[in-house]
């Protein structure tokens, strides 16, 4: 895990101050855990954006194992350093897997969105869902957090970024741990996240 953390942090720090573009703040889903970083959905996003007539830089500041509290702690420096136009927040999964209170997760995500908006960036939330063994009450409360934060700040939301990947019959899309997507699933993750990103690009 340390190897992937180092790669992702170096990727983020390699960009110059005021790089602008898109900043992705996520956990192992966006840090390409268990894969080469070049195979991850954020790298695929960067490739797609670099192919445009006007390329858009992407800073991947995702850290495997990160929680919403960790993301909130890191965000101010990232905003100051990169001055992004769009902040993509893909956090919360580890909060849920650790049984953390949804109310605390909601507070952290809401503050992250607020900080990004105050920095004149637009925001995209990538939501997550928990497996059913966590219980109906907890899984519903967890999923509702993303909806509530999206509505509170009027920012777009992808309700479940692993839609069509997690909890489906095709197990080739998930690694042996049942938590992290395989390389074959990365394009689907990008496709799930792409519509609101494309809508944002059209406003630039």
Image (cartoon, rainbow, N blue to C red):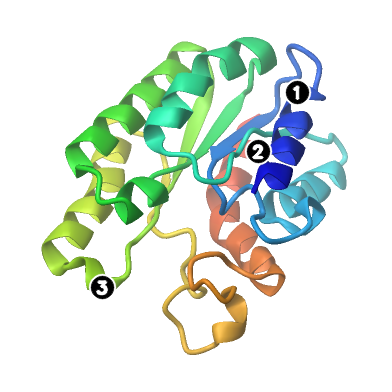
Q: Is residue 200 above or below residue 84?
A: below
Q: Quadrant of residue 12?
A: top right
Residue at the (67%, 12%) spot, across then down: 81
Q: Is residue 139 visible?
A: yes
Q: Is residue 24 above or below residue 190?
A: above
User: Of helix, strand and loop, which one carries label 1?
Assistant: helix
Q: Are marks 3 and 2 in contact (CB under 8 Å)?
A: no
Describe residue 45's horizontal placement relative to residue 68 as left or right.
Answer: right
| 184 or 56: nearer the viewer | 184
Q: Nearer the viewer, residue 10 or 59?
A: 10
Q: Secondary structure at mark 3?
A: helix
Number of other residues with Cα within 10 Å of mark 2, as a class: few under 14, some 14 to 19, many 20 or more: few
* Residue 61 percent location from the top left of the image: 64, 33
Residue 202 in view: no
Which percent across, then down, holds residue 145? 25, 45
Q: Residue at x 57, y 75 (%)?
A: 174
Q: Are marks 1 and 2 in contact (CB under 8 Å)?
A: no
Which mark identifies residue 201? Answer: 2
Q: Identify which residue is drawn at 31% across, 51% down.
A: 98
Query: Is residue 44 rendered to the left or right of residue 32?
Result: right
* Mark 3 neighbour density, 10 Å: few (under 14) some (14–19) many (20 or more): few
Mark 1 or mark 2, which is nearer to you? Answer: 1
Q: How many marks?
A: 3
From mark 3 to mark 1, how far is it between C-alphas?
Answer: 38 Å
In the rendering, at what x and y percent does residue 107 appear? 25, 29
| The quadrant where residue 11 appears | top right
Residue located beneath label 3 in the image: 132
Q: What residue sits right under mark 1 in the picture?
A: 13
Note whether 167 is above or below 112 in the view shown.
Answer: below
């Amino acid at each position: 895990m340390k190897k992937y953390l180092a790669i992702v942090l170096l990727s983020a720090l390699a960009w110059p101050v005021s790089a602008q573009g898109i900043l992705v703040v996520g956990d192992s889903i966006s840090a390409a855990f268990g894969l080469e970083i070049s195979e991850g959905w954020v790298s695929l996003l960067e490739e797609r954006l670099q192919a445009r007539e006007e390329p858009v830089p992407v800073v991947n500041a995702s850290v495997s194992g990160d929680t919403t509290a960790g993301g909130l702690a890191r965000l101010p420096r990232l905003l100051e350093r990169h001055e992004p136009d769009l902040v993509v927040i893909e956090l919360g999964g580890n909060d849920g897997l650790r049984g953390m209170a949804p109310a605390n997760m909601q507070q952290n995500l809401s503050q992250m969105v607020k900080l990004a908006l105050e920095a004149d960036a637009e925001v995209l939330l990538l939501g997550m869902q928990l497996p059913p063994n966590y219980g109906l009450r907890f899984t519903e409360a967890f999923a509702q957090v993303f909806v509530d934060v999206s509505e509170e700040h009027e920012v777009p939301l992808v309700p479940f970024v692993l839609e069509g990947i997690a909890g489906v019959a095709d197990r080739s899309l998930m690694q042996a741990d049942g938590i992290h997507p395989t390389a074959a699933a990365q394009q689907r993750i990008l496709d799930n996240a792409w519509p609101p990103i494309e809508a944002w690009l059209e406003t630039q």
